[in-house]
Image (spheres, grey):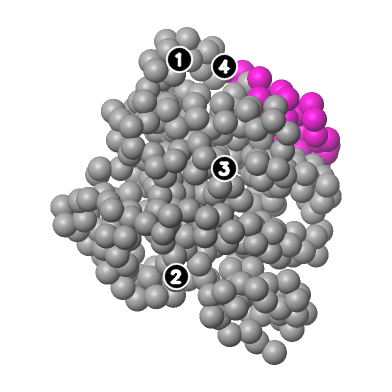
């Protein structure tokens, strides 16, 4: 019996040639063939307008200059990156990837109106990991746009987990550890998605967030030397438990073959946390101090506007006073938001303690015994 069709699947707007490559390189289980047929049909329908959009806009997009390099919010999944980006993008001086320019990146100009209406309905309740809603006026992770035109995306791990073998997609996030050919492919695709959205925003500076970028802070800094980085960090016990919950739920929604066993998800979450931050700490320390700032999530939640002012001052971003009314309006809209709560088991606590002691020490969190 086939699995229930997910109309808000994160590859529903995948460019046809990229979808064919992904489908050919990964096994598909029988129960997921209905979902695969639907994605193939939608991608096929969107292929002609996508090609026409590329044909008309390729040259002006390629000629677009990124005059001000992006501001990046980095941090592990479930560290508060979404809340921080939602708040900062209320400042109208920034550009960002909305749902249409993300999920249906290749068709976000000619078909924007039609796709916006469809996504407004389909994205309701589409964040299974928390109580936040996707809305068309809030940002999404730019790497989901890249995932629709490239096979190099860690999010493909959730679509093709292959019983745990899909962790091969983790390596695509550590792009500076790949061979030169794959690095060039990544740079070409990533630079294109940034230029396209910069073009659509008339040259505005982009404010971007994706936990995947925490794997490649140094690579991003080399590509965009003027880039600024806001690293938001949070208690690792909370982060790991919430990330395991997120990966498990998203895999259930998006996977097209065999989901990874729970213990594999658990181990991958902790191992990836360790690998990312041992690398991120080095890369953040190597850049000028005025180009990055650390923000503690727990403190940020107590005084978000005060910390936003600190971010602007430290990174040399103008316009805080002009943007204050927008920040106030968003914070007022979120005053009743309730966070998820999880219970830490002794087994998971011991696993976290064994791997992440360096993170506890670096940020001064107390390790439970």
Q: Magenta region's main secondary structure?
A: helix
Q: Please give the residue where the numbered disc 4 appears in the rendered image.
A: 47
Q: Earlier in the sequence, mark 2 or mark 1?
A: 1
Please name the residue that numbered disc 1 is placed on: 58
Q: What element carries label 1?
A: helix
Residue 86 in the image, given as x and y percentages of width and height: 37, 54
Cα distance in 3D space between marks 1 and 4: 15 Å
- Between the C-alphas of marks 3 and 2, the distance is 25 Å
What's the residue at 45%, 38% (across, down)? Answer: 224
Q: Residues within 10 Å of mark 3 (few under 14, many from 20)?
A: some
Name the residue carrying label 3: 219
Q: Which of marks 2 and 4 is nearer the N terminus?
A: 4
**Rounded to the nearest whole Å, what is the CA distance between mark 3 and mark 1?**
25 Å
Q: Is residue 31 above or below residue 262?
A: above
Residue 355 place in picture, x, y as percent:
73, 71
From mark 2 to mark 4, how far is it between C-alphas?
A: 42 Å
**Numbered disc in front, either 2 or 4:** 2
């Amino acid at each position: 019996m086939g699995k229930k069709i997910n109309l808000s699947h994160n590859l529903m707007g995948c460019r046809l040639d990229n979808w064919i490559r992904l489908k050919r390189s990964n096994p598909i289980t029988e129960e997921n063939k209905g979902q695969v047929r639907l994605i193939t049909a939608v991608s096929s329908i969107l292929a002609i307008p996508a090609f026409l959009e590329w044909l008309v806009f390729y040259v002006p997009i390629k000629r677009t200059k990124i005059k001000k390099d992006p501001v990046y919010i980095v941090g592990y999944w479930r560290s508060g990156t979404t809340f921080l980006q939602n708040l900062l993008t209320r400042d109208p001086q920034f550009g960002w990837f909305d749902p249409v320019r993300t999920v249906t990146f290749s068709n976000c100009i000619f078909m924007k109106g039609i796709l916006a209406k469809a996504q407004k309905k389909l994205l309701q309740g589409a964040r299974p990991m928390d109580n936040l809603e996707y809305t068309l006026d809030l940002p999404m992770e730019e790497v989901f746009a890249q995932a629709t035109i490239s096979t190099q995306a860690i999010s493909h791990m959730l679509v093709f987990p292959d019983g745990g073998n899909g962790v091969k997609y983790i390596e695509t996030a550590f792009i500076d550890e790949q061979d030169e050919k794959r690095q060039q492919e990544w740079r070409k695709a990533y630079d294109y998605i940034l230029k396209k959205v910069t073009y659509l925003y008339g040259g505005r500076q982009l404010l971007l967030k994706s936990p995947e970028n925490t794997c490649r802070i140094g690579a991003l800094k080399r590509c965009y030397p003027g880039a600024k980085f806001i690293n938001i960090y949070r208690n690792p016990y909370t982060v790991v438990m919430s990330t395991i919950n997120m990966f498990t739920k998203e895999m259930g929604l998006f996977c097209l073959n065999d989901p990874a066993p729970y213990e594999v998800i658990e181990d991958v979450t902790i191992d990836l946390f360790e690998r990312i931050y041992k690398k991120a700490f080095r890369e953040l320390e190597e850049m000028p101090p005025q180009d990055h700032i650390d923000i503690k999530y727990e403190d940020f939640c107590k005084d978000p506007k005060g910390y936003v002012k600190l971010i602007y001052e430290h990174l040399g971003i103008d316009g805080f006073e002009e943007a204050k009314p927008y920040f106030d309006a968003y914070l007022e809209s979120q005053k009743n938001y309730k966070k998820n709560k999880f219970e830490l088991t002794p087994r998971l606590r011991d696993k976290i303690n064994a791997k992440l002691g360096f993170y506890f020490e670096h940020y001064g969190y107390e390790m439970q015994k």
